[in-house]
Amino acid sequence: MEKIQLRLVITGLLLILLGFLYGMIHTIAVDHAPRLQLREDYKVAFTQAADKGFDNRTSKSTMNNIESVNARTIEYQRAIGAHTHAIYLGLMITILGLVLNFALANSPYKFHIMGALGAGAAIYPLGLALQASGMILAGEVMALLGSVAVIGCIGLIVLKLLTNNDAEQ
């Protein structure tokens, strides 16, 4: 196993570990009762709207309640989704690191693809972490850049495997 290939495998395993640790810490440290409370908050907001009808004051109050509940729901979903994405990405990077030598055996772009894959693997979870911490726009940009790098590298690897397979036949 080459040094850069080993780095990809280690990066993938570290992402998996960090994803599980983040999930474990989130499970232990964060009370999940607010998630159950969100359902009740929605129920109250919609019941108020149904009971009182919609005049200017009631509709503004109800809409503010609903928007507040929506914001808390999205924040909770991002926190949960961040560790899941990190685990899946780590698994994919580990598998790619193991098959990369076979897939790109004689390619002059092998190290470029490995570098871009490693960079994408680092940038994507960082973007998810920024989103979970409230820096939505910066997080979305970084997650998009990281995912484009990883998806592009996977596409190149698959293309190389397909052309190698066609050449052998």
Image (cartoon, rainbow, N blue to C red):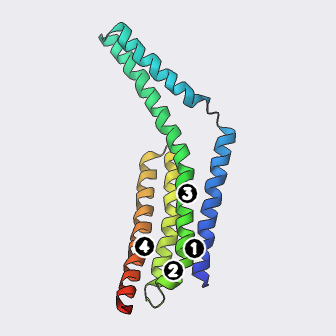
- The reply to whether residue 133 is in sight is no
Disc 2 element: helix
Separation of disc 4 and disc 2 at Cα?
11 Å
Separation of disc 3 and disc 4 at Cα?
17 Å
Question: Do the numbered discs 2 and 1 sit on residues whose CB atoms are within 8 Å?
Answer: yes
Q: Who comes first in sequence, dot 4 or dot 2?
A: 2
Q: Residue at x 43, y 84 (%)?
A: 109
Other-residue count near label 2 (Cα within 10 Å), few / some / many at <14 / 14–19 / ≥20: many
Residues 100 and 76: in front is 100
Question: Do the numbered discs 1 and 4 sit on residues whose CB atoms are within 8 Å?
Answer: no
Q: Who comes first in sequence, dot 2 or dot 3?
A: 3
Residue located beneath label 4 in the image: 153
Give the answer, above or below, for where 67 lies relative to 153.
above
Separation of disc 2 and disc 3 at Cα?
20 Å
**Of discs 4 and 2, which sits in the foreground?**
2
Q: Which mark is residue 100?
A: 2
Question: Do the numbered discs 3 and 1 sit on residues whose CB atoms are within 8 Å?
Answer: no
Residue 80 lies in what quarter of the image?
top right
